[in-house]
């Protein structure tokens, strides 16, 4: 990792421009916004304030900062950005310092000051989905927050008409377009792990719900959604007793007190979406840790699931975080090796799965056609590195041909000191197998973020449009809202 690239990363991780409302005229945009995208909007969520007072919060604990990019009919782009007005944001903005403990950040360097503080505050910084007349900002261990999709004004916690009142949901929610459902997953962690899945129709009525328990502590950030199954990564965790004692005493954090248990086999847990059939646990060829899922579907009784799998890692160093008093070191992510994009096949009735690697590149943030959840989809897009030894921080966008894995993947790489985020696929309404890929490119040295639009069928050809704007913080997840 070159010094300039490290500086660029720190600039992009630490920048905090606050509320924005500005228009980038068509004359300032490189290339042309495709007509098929005009009238649509891209949303993006992520931490927007991590240097809080004199301490740097882990990005997981940075306050949620929602961005919307409206592609206007005249070829211009309107950027709006606003913090999600959670209680912890308001308190810490007022105080100008960290007040509450986070998942991986303590508010104070003095352990006795951390003991009475709330264990982990909801910063609504991880995902974003459009739902009815609202925009939902998801977080890992609490309820999503509802925002106005136009003004980004925060309405408050979303409980889906009381469905999840008092319960947390995973930040990742999935849409089954075929059945018109939104699926939610709540995770209860203890000696064993309890999963509660709920499927909601468009009126927030619970169509189905299912509760299952898995033995031991399981890490879950995302899940796959097939027509018959919810698919969970086995992801066994072990407690680090000393770190847990330090966390309880206010000197450590909960994220640093757990660790992937790489000594146990890799597994998937398959939970039936309907009926009361038993959970199936299937063994994978190697121990792996699964953070994000791609698509999942069924073919003649076999289950096919695309996963992004890490061989090993330690919690707490994500994004190169080194603690509250040190800069980010993006080389930390390189030390753990690339995430493999794997297509897992579970034969009907079998408790053993096979897999094939879909690309030699390390891939994360897998996205595909938003209406293809649970059905075969032709292409997967992901964030990747041109150098196959690494994954994040990402410098490239990859398009993988899922119908012909032998077909070389398409790749587009941003500039030498630039970082790419999650790629969103915007299908062409008239030709849904075609479309565009949108992503945010951050160049901390140039103090610029660029919304890049690529032709999904010709990533290698480079952007068809580049929308320049002030440097925005590195984001996590986003969503494309098609023109109506
Ligand atoms: Fe995620």
Image: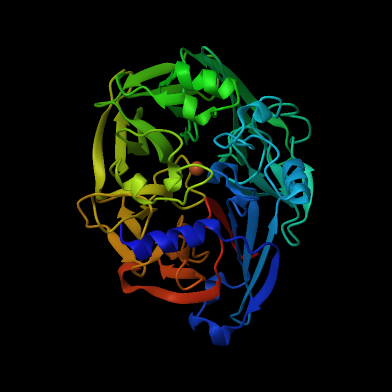
Q: Is residue 96 left or right of residue 272?
A: right
- Please state the horizontal and vertical placement of residue 388, each as a whole percent of the image: 24, 52
Q: Nearer the viewer, residue 57 or 166?
A: 57
Q: Residue at x 61, y 33 (%)?
A: 184
**Position above or below: 409 against 462:** above
- Please state the horizontal and vertical placement of residue 348, each as a whole percent of the image: 33, 23
Res. 60 visible in picture? yes
**Position above or below: 259 against 476:** above
Query: Looking at the figure, which quarter contains the N terminus?
Result: bottom left
Q: Nearer the viewer, residue 374 or 321?
A: 321
Res. 420 visible in picture? no
- Please state the horizontal and vertical placement of residue 91, each as a whole percent of the image: 77, 44
Q: Residue at x 47, y 65 (%)?
A: 442
Q: Count every numbered label the image shows and give the total.
A: 0
Query: Looking at the figure, which quarter contains the C terminus?
Result: bottom right
Q: Is residue 10 left or right of residue 160?
A: left
């Amino acid at each position: 990792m070159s010094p300039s690239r490290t500086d660029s990363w720190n600039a992009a991780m630490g920048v905090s421009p606050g509320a924005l409302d500005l228009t980038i005229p068509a004359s300032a945009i490189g290339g042309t916004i495709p007509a098929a995208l005009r009238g649509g909007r891209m949303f993006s969520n992520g931490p927007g304030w991590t240097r809080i007072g004199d301490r740097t919060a882990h990005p997981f604990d940075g306050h949620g900062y929602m961005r919307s990019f409206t592609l206007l009919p005249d070829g211009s782009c309107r950027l709006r950005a606003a913090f999600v007005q959670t209680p912890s944001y308001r308190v810490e903005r007022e105080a100008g310092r960290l007040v509450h403990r986070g998942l991986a950040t303590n508010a104070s360097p003095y352990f006795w000051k951390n003991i009475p503080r709330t264990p982990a505050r909801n910063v609504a910084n991880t995902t974003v989905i459009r739902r009815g007349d609202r925009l939902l900002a998801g977080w890992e261990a609490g309820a999503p927050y509802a925002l106005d999709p136009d003004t980004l004004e925060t309405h408050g916690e979303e409980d889906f008409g009381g469905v999840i009142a008092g319960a947390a949901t995973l930040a990742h929610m999935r849409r089954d377009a075929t059945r018109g459902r939104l699926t939610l997953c709540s995770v209860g962690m203890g000696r064993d792990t309890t999963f509660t899945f709920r499927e909601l129709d468009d009126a927030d009525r619970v169509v189905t719900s299912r509760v299952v328990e898995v033995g031991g502590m399981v890490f879950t950030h995302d899940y796959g959604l097939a027509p018959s199954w919810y698919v969970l990564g086995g992801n066994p965790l072990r407690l680090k007793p000393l770190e847990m004692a330090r966390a309880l005493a206010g000197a450590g954090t909960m994220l640093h007190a757990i660790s992937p248990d790489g000594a146990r086999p890799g597994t998937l847990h398959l939970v039936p979406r309907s009926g009361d059939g038993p959970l199936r646990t299937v063994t994978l060829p190697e121990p792996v840790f699964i953070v994000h899922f791609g698509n999942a579907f069924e073919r003649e009784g076999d289950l096919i699931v695309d996963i992004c799998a890490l061989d090993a890692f330690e919690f707490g160093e994500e994004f190169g975080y080194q603690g509250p008093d040190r800069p980010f070191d993006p080389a930390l992510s390189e030390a753990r090796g690339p995430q493999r994009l794997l297509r897992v096949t579970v034969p009907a009735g079998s408790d053993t799965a096979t897999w094939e690697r879909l690309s030699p590149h390390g891939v994360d943030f897998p996205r595909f056609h938003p209406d293809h959840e649970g059905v075969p989809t032709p292409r997967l897009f992901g964030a990747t590195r041109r150098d196959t030894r690494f994954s994040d921080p990402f410098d490239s966008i990859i398009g993988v041909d899922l119908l012909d894995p032998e077909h070389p993947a398409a790749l587009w790489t941003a500039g030498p000191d630039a970082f790419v985020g999650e790629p969103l696929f915007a299908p062409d309404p008239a030709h849904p197998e075609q479309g565009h890929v949108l992503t945010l490119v951050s160049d901390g040295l140039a103090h610029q973020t660029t919304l890049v639009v690529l032709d999904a069928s010709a990533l290698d050809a480079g952007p068809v449009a580049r929308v320049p704007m002030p440097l925005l913080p590195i984001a996590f997840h986003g969503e494309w809202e098609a023109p109506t």
